[in-house]
Image: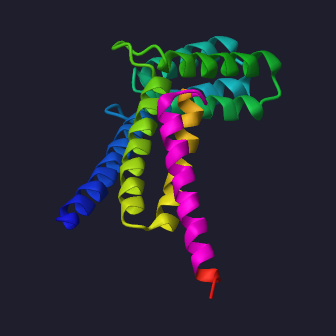
Amino acid sequence: MKEPLKNRALLTAIVSLFLIAGLVTAFTTLGPADESWRRHLSGVDQALRTGDQGQFEINLEAAVAAAGQSPGQRLRLAAVLDARAADLDQAAMAETLRRHAADLRQDISRQPDGTDPTELLDHLLLLYADGLFRVAGHYLRRGMASEAEGLLKRVLFVRESILGPGHGDVERAARAYAEALAQLNGTAGAKATP
């Protein structure tokens, strides 16, 4: 009877991890568009070499437009613009690149569906912590305190970082962590006495 519970707890943790990995990947990969903005960056580079401010602005705007609404595309373009700005001697053009990079990153938080990537990531991390908490609870019930302790430490860190120290879920994780430590100390004390 305990074997299905073990499998269910592990399955829950694995599914949570895959869910988090999939959604984080969706926010950081290229997305449906290709990297057509890279073609426009060659025009930006050419304008930087020649010092042509007009061509620089035109190609930069075209690159930003080509990145579309894909969060991954926008983040990659922002990183490229930051790198180019760091290597640039012309202060005005470097500042323009930095401003566009900052705008690209800021626009990600204003997705059309109203989803804030920070909130989504916090939600995913809490799901991950919930899965770990279930697995740790299973370990504690089986007397496997050393395995539970490491998981509960992660759960406590994630929950406290996101929810704050006074939240009920944080307090539950802290109690479970204390229980795991008590079991570990009891086991260590029992082994030490002859």
For residue 179: magenta? yes
Q: Is residue 6 above or below residue 105?
A: below
The residue sitting at 52% across, 54% down in the picture is 179
Residue 14 horizontal/vertical position (percent): 32, 54
The residue sitting at 48% across, 20% down in the picture is 108
Q: Quadrant of residue 73?
A: top left
Locate the N terminus by quadrant.
bottom left
Q: Is residue 1 above or below residue 85?
A: below
For residue 182: magenta? yes
**Extreme residue toward the bottom, this view:** 194
Q: Is residue 190 above or below residue 104?
A: below
Q: Is residue 179 above or below residue 48?
A: below
163 and 109: which is toward the camera: 163
Direction from residue 154 to residue 131 in the image, left or right: left
Residue 139 horizontal/vertical position (percent): 39, 62
Locate the C terminus by quadrant.
bottom right
Instruction: Give the magenta-colored segment's residue range.
Output: 164-190
User: Is residue 42 in view?
Assistant: no
21 and 104: which is toward the camera: 21
The residue sitting at 67% across, 16% down in the picture is 99
